Amino acid sequence: MATREEVRAGPFAKIYDPTVGEHRPWYINDHTIVRADDGRWHLFGITHPEPADPFHEVEFAHAVAPELPGPWTKRAPALTVDPGYGETHLWAPHVLQFRGRYYMFYAGGGADRTRAAINLATSTDLFRWTRAPQGPLFHDGYDARDPMILRLGEKWVMYYCATSAPQGGHHVVCYRLSADLRHWGERHIAYTDPSIGTEAGNTESPFVLPHNGSWYLFIGPRPGYVGTDVFRSDNPYRFRIGDKVGHIRAHAAELVQDAQRWWITSAGWGQGGVHLAPLSFPTRTPGAVVPR
């Protein structure tokens, strides 16, 4: 159950509408926001004309802004589906910068949903992207998707959602470790939800961040389409259902740090674009332990 020290979001304001300049409404779903070396912000995300059509989401939206609240300007799609690479759709990009190069991790699907592909493309300017020549980083199921990467010590950690078994089971948040962002180890589970199924689970869009000596996991949709639960732990590799410390009315939430404060986004089918709100954390948290 949530404690009194809940993680909370302030009012949401729309910062980007993908319908501008189009002849019909478009949506942005799972997305990522990154700041370039020149100070400009870049947004990448699932996009498609309304209504929802997830298995025909075949390009990643790209928009650029001078400041996080905007104004945001639509650019050409960052990436389009490549059937020759085994992709059947493009879902949930996550972009980070390391040593002068940008890395975009995303779900590329595939013919076998029990062995869905997590793929990588890289760029030096956030406009031109090249897929990893060796192919997908790994496969997992059911419909493994929504990768998010965090640096912990000398290792990188990739969190993503899947099910406890490839054919289905409990909805889980998995993680894998890497030393170079290209080769990833065995699958482990950071969080197991009581719910059971295959596609469209409630551990989607996992995002993990450290704050004030604790680790926070954001996942959703819970309990409805527009809803994100927040869990707190002293261990970034272990979260439990009883660790819940907040609920935010957001879908496909991403956490963005700017001007020494955290912000949370919301988007999705029928949501009219991307929305942004300030995020507040409890001031008192227990000490954290980083496993080695």
Image (spheres, rainbow, N blue to C red):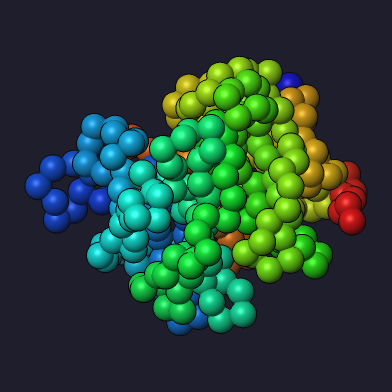
Res. 237 image quadrant: top right
- Residue 20 seen from this side: yes
Residue 41 or 145: which is nearer the viewer? Answer: 145
Q: Residue at x 68, y 18 (%)?
A: 194
Q: How many marks?
A: 0
- At 71% from the left and 43% from the top, the residue drawn is 187
- Is residue 150 visible in this depiction of the protein? no
**Vertical order, 90 against 247 (above or below):** below
**On the picture, is 169 further left or further right than 46?**
right
Place of residue 16 in the rendered image (x, y in percent of width and height, measured from the top left)? 32, 53
Taking the spot 61% from the left edge, 17% from the top edge, the residue there is 196
Q: Residue at x 78, y 25 (%)?
A: 242
* Quarter of the N terminus within the rendering: top right
Q: Identify the image quadrant of residue 78.
A: bottom left
Q: Is residue 128 above or below residue 265?
A: below
x and y, in percent, of residue 197 in the image? 56, 19
83 relative position to 261: left or right? left
- From the viewer's perspective, tell me whether residue 253 is left or right of residue 287: left
Q: Quadrant of the C terminus?
A: bottom right
Residue 67 location (% of width, % of height):
42, 68
Camera-side residue: 26 or 84? 84
